[in-house]
Image: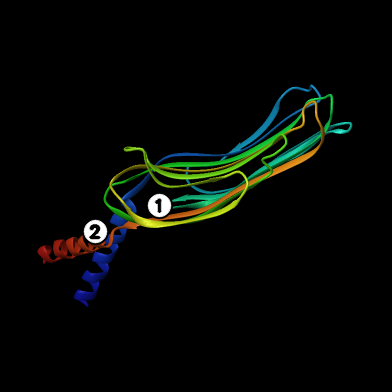
Amino acid sequence: MKTTTLAMTAIAIATASALASVSTTSVNRFDLCEYDVAFTGPTSVQNSGPAAGLFDDFTDASYWEGSVGGSSYADQVTNVGPGVYSGMVDAAANTQGNGFDFSFHGAQSHYEVGFSVSSASSYSLTGWVNAWGAINGEYSVADFSLVNTDTSAVIAASSTDTDFLTFDASGTLSAGNYALIADATSWVDRTFATGFGDATSTVSFELTIVPAPGSAALLGLGGLLAIRRRR
């Protein structure tokens, strides 16, 4: 019974140490929609997310002035948790022009997290980026990056304005500071132009961080030895 209790206590200590090895230092999450139609002046709508936990949001804007106008939306379902940063950001816009008025709609869904790793930790990263519509007055870009901000070294990055691309990486993060950024931005400008345009962009990602196997084992052993010394 004592041996079982000691083992469980050691595991608990290792688990607590694992969570403590990764700490979130900054968070910036928002959905933004903008439009400028028929000389009404720029208008924007924005929702911002919390510093931790789930952000499940849908922000949209629509405006028409006669035959000119359009709509846009930005949405995301993202999470900021101990050692897990994940979710999806999505942006889309469409606009109809009449040839002699302003006609602009745009959207941006943004996720940016800074975090620190106190000891060498294993990581697993998967996801994809997708964008469409980067032609004829349309702009659509899906960006993802994971960077060591101490050294500016890029751990992983993916960006597209026309394609569907996947990314999959794993390895070890050394102790230090990091930034993860996922951004979907789309806009359509039909100012003084005719015709209809639309654009979309999406980023999906999941980053999981745990102590490197050797570090976890040492943490568990250290906890067990500490308990035995007390006996």
Q: Nearer the viewer, mark 2 or mark 1?
A: 2
Residue 36 position by quadrant: top right
Residue furthest right in the image: 66
Q: Position of residue 71 (x, y in %)?
A: 76, 39
Secondary structure of residue under mark 2: helix
Image point (46%, 44%), residue name? 145
* Residue 4 is at least partly visible in this image: yes
Frontmost residue, 33 versus 142? 142
Q: Residues within 10 Å of mark 1 (few under 14, many from 20)?
A: some
Up-down: is 195 above or below 4?
Answer: above
**What residue is pinned by disc 1?**
82
Residue 214 position by quadrant: bottom left
Q: Position of residue 149 (x, y in %)?
A: 36, 38
Label disc, if present, on residue 215 of the rendered structure: 2
Image quarter in which the N terminus is found: bottom left
Q: The disc labelled 1 sits on which kind of residue?
A: Pro
Q: Residues within 10 Å of mark 2 (few under 14, many from 20)?
A: some
Up-down: is 55 above or below 216?
Answer: above
Frontmost residue, 123 versus 190? 190
Q: Position of residue 91 (x, y in %)?
A: 65, 43
* Residue 59 is at least partly visible in this image: no
Taking the image as shown, residue 84 lies to the left or right of residue 38, namely: left
Q: The disc labelled 2 sits on which kind of residue?
A: Ser
Image quarter in which the C terminus is found: bottom left
Compute the Cα span from label 2 to label 1.
18 Å
Q: Position of residue 78 (x, y in %)?
A: 54, 50
Closer to the chain start, of discs 2 and 1, is 1
Taking the image as shown, residue 33 lies to the left or right of residue 49, namely: right
Secondary structure of residue under mark 1: loop
Q: How is the image coloured?
A: rainbow
